[in-house]
Image (spheres, grey):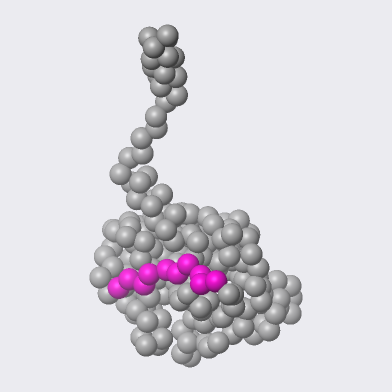
Amino acid sequence: MKKIIISIIFVFITIIPVYSYDRDEITNISVYEKINPAIVAIDAKVSDGTSSGSGCIINPQGLILTSSHVILDSKDIKVTTSNGKSYKAQVVKKLGSGSDLTILKINSEKPFHTVTMGNSSSVKVGQKVLAIGNPFGFSGTLTQGIVSRIDKKRNKIQTDAAINPGSSGGPLLNTNGEVIGINQAIYNPDNNTSNIGIGFAIPINEAKAILN
């Protein structure tokens, strides 16, 4: 009887394949699982319809960092967290003139998951980056790429990670899961809505300086 049980267990183990992830996959999975609970989808009612984007929760009490152009001057802003819960958001402050950064606030009895801010001054061209956002309404979407260029004149981080409409306001992350930039826009010479173009992010140190 004991031999039969052992044989059944052996057959069961050999039938079910054990998938092993490579180092890059483990990094991507780890960052996503750590950060995605702190990423939100934002829908703001504006004069010509709805403006959609992304944001990241920066403290447990529900402060959210996003791009100003996502909400424009809207007073009707809905934030949806990764677990599908929706909240009405209030604008707390627009950070600086022309910085395209805004702080929103949502309220809950339970603390929220938060992101960790990194140091954008240590960003190097060629380093791997990840982006999580709400492109075309598909919330919790992860893309990856590298830092393609650092535009010191415009104070922007250029990346080839896909940043589609709806990703604006979401985080650009290093492989430690730290926010190094806030995704802002995609430059597309054809003016279409594909991700064929150049993505830009605002260095996180700009936001940190204003927040401090």
Name the spot of residue 20 as percent of width and height, x first: 36, 35
* Total residue callouts: 0
For residue 174: magenta? Answer: no
Task: Identify the residue at image location x=59%, y=59%.
Answer: 83
Q: Is residue 188 visible?
A: no
Residue 90: quadrant of the picture: bottom right
Q: Main secondary structure of the magenta part?
A: loop
Name the spot of residue 63 as percent of width and height, x first: 51, 79
Q: Is residue 144 above or below residue 19?
A: below
Residue 61 left/right relative to 87: left
Q: Which residues are magenta?
A: 110-119
Q: Nearer the viewer, residue 100 or 141?
A: 141
Q: Nearer the viewer, residue 69 or 33?
A: 33
Where's the N terminus, which quadrant? Answer: top left
Q: Is residue 109 above or below residue 209?
A: above
Task: Identify the residue at image location x=64%, y=85%.
Answer: 73
Residue 9: quadrant of the picture: top left
Task: Identify the residue at image location x=74%, y=75%.
Answer: 48
Residue found at the far bottom of this picture: 97
Q: Is residue 116 visible?
A: yes
Residue 75 left/right relative to 9: right
Q: Is residue 27 above or below residue 192?
A: above
Q: Nearer the viewer, residue 72 or 37?
A: 37
Name the spot of residue 96 as percent of width and height, x first: 46, 90
Name the spot of residue 49 as percent of width and height, x first: 74, 72
Residue 194: quadrant of the picture: bottom right
For residue 114: magenta? Answer: yes
